[in-house]
Image: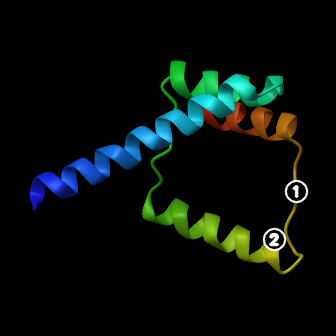
Amino acid sequence: MTNAITFEVMSKFNELKVALAKQILESENESELLSVDLVMNHGVDFSLTTKQKAELDEAHAKFKRGEGHSYSSAQMVRRVRKLARG
């Protein structure tokens, strides 16, 4: 049974890789491609602490209530880079 589960997980993982590769190849959006490059080649770590997850959930709830802010992709890149620098 373990081998069947492992095969199913690996199959889904490979399907995800193929789907992502297709999206990248079909993309004409430079900012999307630069984002993928940033993640894949610059060691971006998207692990969040419990506190960060709670903050993100609260910000999302505010946004859904119409109380939050929205930012363009360029604004978000600047904000993330600034935060990453400390």
What residue is pinned by disc 1?
A: 70
The answer to which image quadrant residue 37 occupies is top right
**In front of the other: 62 or 30:** 30
Which residue is pictured at 76% across the width and 34% down the height?
77
Which residue is pictured at 53% across the width and 24% down the height?
40
Q: How is the image coloured?
A: rainbow
What residue is pinned by disc 2?
A: 63
Q: Is residue 86 something that shows in the picture? A: no
Task: Where is residue 9? Give x, y as percent.
Answer: 30, 51
Indicate whether 31 appears above or below 62: above
Q: What separation in Å lies between label 2 and label 1 (alpha carbons)?
A: 8 Å
Indicate whether 44 appears above or below 25: below
Q: Is residue 16 something that shows in the picture? A: yes
Indicate whether 19 appears above or below 9: above
Q: Residues within 10 Å of mark 1 (few under 14, many from 20)?
A: few
| Residue type, numbered disc 2 | Phe
SS label for mark 2: helix
Task: Where is residue 78? Give x, y as percent.
Answer: 79, 32
Contact between marks 2 and 1 (CB within 8 A): the answer is yes
| Residue type, numbered disc 1 | Ser
Task: Where is residue 62? Give x, y as percent.
Answer: 78, 75
Report the side of 69 relative to 78 (left or right): right
Q: Earlier in the sequence, mark 2 or mark 1?
A: 2
**In front of the other: 18 or 71:** 18
SS label for mark 1: loop
Task: Where is residue 79? Give x, y as percent.
Answer: 76, 39
Which residue is pictured at 34% across the width and 45% down the height?
11
Report the side of 19 relative to 2 (left or right): right
Image quadrant where one finds the N terminus: bottom left
Report the side of 66 relative to 21 (left or right): right
